[in-house]
Image (spheres, rainbow, N blue to C red):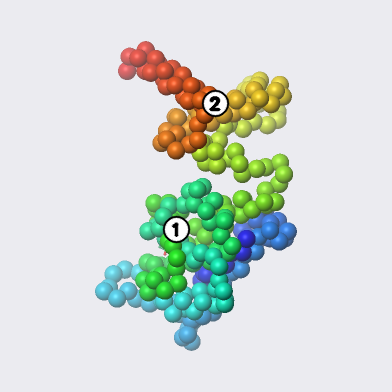
Amino acid sequence: MKIKVLTIFPEMLEPVLHSSILGRAMEKGLLEVELINIRDYSKNKHRNTDDYPFGGGAGMVMLAQPIVDAMRAAMGENFQGRRIYLSPRGRTLNQQVVEELAREQELILLCGHYEGVDQRALDLVIDEELSVGDYVLTGGELPALIVIDAVSRLIPGVLGSEESPEDESFSTGLLEYPQYTRPRVFEGMEAPEVLLNGHHAHIQRWRREKSLEITLKRRPELLERAPLDKADRLYLEALRAREEEFNEDDPL
Ligand code: 4FV
């Protein structure tokens, strides 16, 4: 997967891209990330990339020209991929969108700053706006790193053989089950016996039931879309019946 990032603060991304799993993926050639400094495409002597907004208002707006020229340079001759502007106005990122992006040959991510970007740059060189959530940040660099991290996890070979993106939260459509590791007893709290007895089918069932339980409790709306089999549905019915019984017994 090749990803290019247009930013005025490449130094914000460098350390993360050369650390841990992403750093190893880059070393192994599984992931290629190129940082492009928008300032290098500014046509004025102060390398300016922003100006005051027409119509007044607080803050500054990023100029169209440096962004458009940087994007065209990043695209090269026959760009095959998706050009994304990170912005609160965009479609909200979730695992399904991440899986969609991971299927692209190449991604070019534009990181905004200040009050945003001149709309003409977006109209000319952006395919889609994406948001990492309904809150406002100081820039698009952290959202870009989130996209890079989430997409890179899905590239075969990036996660070690002992890890797999398949049964993570949201990949199954459910929240992930609780995890335990050594010691067996920690501050008097014992890890669940079923995980220690090594019976694979029982462990799988326990994990699935825990995922259903946590999802029902914290994000019930996910259950409407998650692929559930008959055993899942029976277990959810039992959970709901138990909840109703508890509520009936609860005088408050
Ligand atoms: C954002 C988000 C975000 C808005 C103004 C950068 C900032 C500044 N990007 N998801 N939420 N961007 O807050 O993607 O330009």
In the image: residue 230, left or right of residue 57: right
In the image: residue 173, left or right of residue 124: right
Q: Secondary structure at mark 2?
A: helix
In the image: residue 220, left or right of residue 24: left
| 19 versus 76 height, above or below | above
Question: Residue 133 in the image: x percent, y percent?
Answer: 43, 51
Rendering quarter of residue 74: bottom right
Question: Residue 199 in the image: x percent, y percent?
Answer: 70, 23
Of residues 27 and 237, which is closer to you in this image? 237
According to the picture, the residue beneath numbered tag 1 turns out to be 130
Number of marks in the image?
2
Q: Is the distance from the Cβ of mark 2 to the nearest ligand 1 atom less than 8 Å?
A: no
Residue at image coords 58%, 31%: 178
Q: Secondary structure at mark 1?
A: strand
Q: Quadrant of the C terminus?
A: top left
According to the picture, the residue beneath numbered tag 2 turns out to be 209
Cα–Cα gap, marks 1 and 2: 33 Å
Q: Is the distance from the Cβ of mark 1 to the nearest ligand 1 atom less than 8 Å?
A: yes
Residue at image coords 38%, 18%: 244
Badge 2 amino acid: Glu
Of residues 155 and 178, which is closer to you in this image? 155
| 199 versus 126 height, above or below | above
Of residues 166 and 153, which is closer to you in this image? 166
Judge the density around disc 1: few (<14), some (14-19), many (≥20) Cα neighbours within 10 Å: many
| 196 versus 224 height, above or below | above
Q: Is residue 138 visible?
A: no
Q: Image quadrant of ligand 1?
A: bottom left
Question: Residue 239 in the image: x percent, y percent?
Answer: 46, 21
Residue occupying the far front of the picture: 230
Q: Quadrant of the N terminus?
A: bottom right
Badge 1 amino acid: Leu
